[in-house]
Image (cartoon, rainbow, N blue to C red):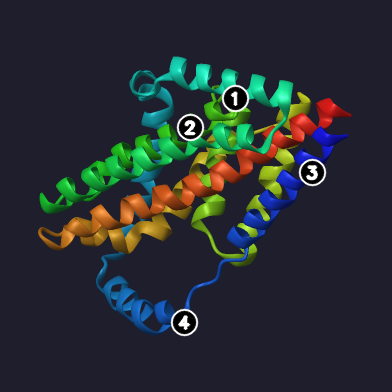
Amino acid sequence: MKKDLILSKQMTILEKHEQKFLNQTESQFSKSNLTPVVNKIQAKIPDKLQSTLDTAFYMGFHMVFEKGSPIIEKTINKEKIAVDYDLSNYAIEKYMRKKHLKTLDKSSKHSKTINESIAAIEGSVLGLLGIGLPDIPLFLGVIVKTINEIALSYGFSYTSKTEKAYLLYLICAAMTKEDRRKAYDKKIEHLGQHIDAQTQTSIDLEAVMKETSDILSNTLLTAKFIQGLPIVGVIGGVVNPFMINKIGTYARIKYKKRYLLRKIKSQR
């Protein structure tokens, strides 16, 4: 009974964080000060750049999932993350204390922070060199690495086609706003339930990659255009870690929710 109560309280807290994330709106300051500036920059961006950027992100995902996986695997300390998870999960199974659930969160939080730093360095250096489009596979690699490490921190694999689609939908939700973000959240919930229940579900990974690429392209069009300009390109050092933080924050919520739901189901 005590275990059920702790899990129930943790889920209530997590769902409040989830709703806060989903209900985020653009601040008045941003609408008044930043949006007009962004609109002016967008008006100067060549029409061809949109389709170029769409393609760059799409090919970037192909590169990361197909050719980049072995490289990303080498940068992930899977053994350490697995040991940390096993120890924390064992303590939760045996004692079910709030402090053990907090320990479980540490690994995913640490991974997110480290990858934000990597993204900042990558964005700043390439930005100063006046490089925008060529750094997209590197940036996507850091995003995928971040989510993969968070998944491992909560005991989930990331190699199956459905888990890759789940990862892509996480990016979509984090990078969209309000009603569209909530619609993606529903897709994520539905897909997560199918994966964890090990039921059949049809996924067109190519289509999901294209969908995610278009969203990232629209979101980062201005930032990447600016990053392609020498000196001003240092903005990549700000934009990239901001995106990693947002995606990582949401990913931590969703994977922890899956973990708690699995525990609640096992208790029943």
Of callouts 4 and 2, which one flags the residue occurring earlier in the amino acid sequence?
A: 4
The C terminus lies in quadrant: top right
Distance, label 4 to label 2, CA atoms, is 35 Å
220, above or below 117, in the image: below
Residue appearing at x 50%, y 36% in the figure = 106
- Residue assigned mark 3: 8
The quarter of the picture where residue 93 lies is: top right
Work out whether residue 182 can be spotted: yes
- Residue assigned mark 1: 88
Secondary element type, mark 1: helix
Distance, label 1 to label 4, CA atoms, is 42 Å
Foreground mark, 1 or 2, reads 1
1, above or below 29, in the image: above
Crowd band around label 4 with a 10 angstrom C-alpha radius: few (<14), some (14–19), many (20+):
few
**Residue flagged by tag 4: what amino acid is it?**
Gln
The quarter of the picture where residue 160 lies is: top right
Residue appearing at x 54%, y 29% in the figure = 153
Distance, label 2 to label 3, CA atoms, is 22 Å
Of callouts 3 and 1, which one flags the residue occurring earlier in the amino acid sequence?
A: 3
- Residue assigned mark 2: 107
Of callouts 1 and 4, which one flags the residue occurring earlier in the amino acid sequence?
A: 4
Of callouts 1 and 2, which one flags the residue occurring earlier in the amino acid sequence?
A: 1
* Circle 1/circle 4 CB separation < 8 Å: no
Secondary element type, mark 3: helix
* Circle 4/circle 3 CB separation < 8 Å: no
